[in-house]
Image (cartoon, rainbow, N blue to C red):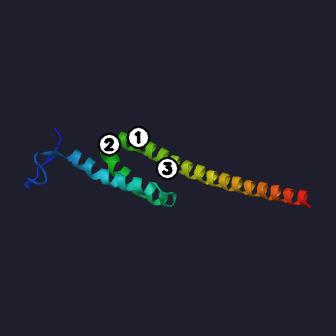
Amino acid sequence: MSPTVTSTNPETFTSSVPVELMMTQDLIPHLQACLVLARESEHHQEANQTFSQLQDRLATEHPIAAAVMRLMWDELLSTHRLADFLEQMSNIERQFAEQMTQSHIQIHQNYLKSSVE
C-alpha cells in the first residue's frame, strides 16, 4: 500500500491523500507555468529549464511518464516554432501582396496619364 498523508485541517483534506497524488497535484501548477512560458518563443529557453526541473522530479517516481512528457514537450515546442515561422511567412506574403498591389496601381496610373497626353 502506498504511503498517505492525513491532514488535521478539515478544510484542506477531507480524507487521506496518497503521497503520489499530492506529488502529482504539486506538478500540475509547475506544468502550467511551463506551458505559459512556452507560448512565446522568446521564453522557450526558460520554459525548457522549468520543464527539465519538472521532468527530473517526475522521473524519480515515474520514469516512463517523464519520458513520455519529454516527447510531448519537445513536440509542443516544435509546433510553437513552426507556428511562429508560418506567421512570419504569412506577414511576408501579405507585405509582398501589398507591394504588388501598389505597384500595379502605379503602373495603371502611369498608363492612364500617358494615354491622356
The residue at 32%/47% (across/down) is 60
Identify the residue position indicated by label 1 in the image: 68
Percent x, y of residue 34: 40, 55
93 or 62: nearer the viewer: 93
The residue at 37%/39% (across/down) is 64
Q: Secondary structure at mark 1?
A: helix
Percent x, y of residue 94: 65, 53
Mark 2, residues whose alpha carbon is within 10 Å: few (<14), some, or many (≥20)?
Answer: few
Mark 3, residues whose alpha carbon is within 10 Å: few (<14), some, or many (≥20)?
Answer: some
Identify the residue position indicated by label 3 in the image: 77
Quadrant location of the N terminus in the rendered image: top left
- What's under tag 2, amino acid-wise? His
47 or 55: nearer the viewer: 47
Task: Tell me if label 1 and label 2 are in contact, CB under 8 Å.
Answer: no
Q: Earlier in the sequence, mark 2 or mark 3?
A: 2
Q: Is residue 10 left or right of residue 97?
A: left
- What's under tag 1, amino acid-wise? Val
Percent x, y of residue 41: 51, 57
Q: Which dot, 2 or 3, sits closer to the camera?
A: 3
Which numbered marker is on residue 97?
none
Identify the residue position indicated by label 2 in the image: 62
Q: Is residue 29 left or right of residue 15?
A: right
Query: Quarter-wise, where is residue 8 in the image?
Result: bottom left
Query: Quarter-wise, where is residue 70 in the image?
Result: top left
Q: Secondary structure at mark 3?
A: helix
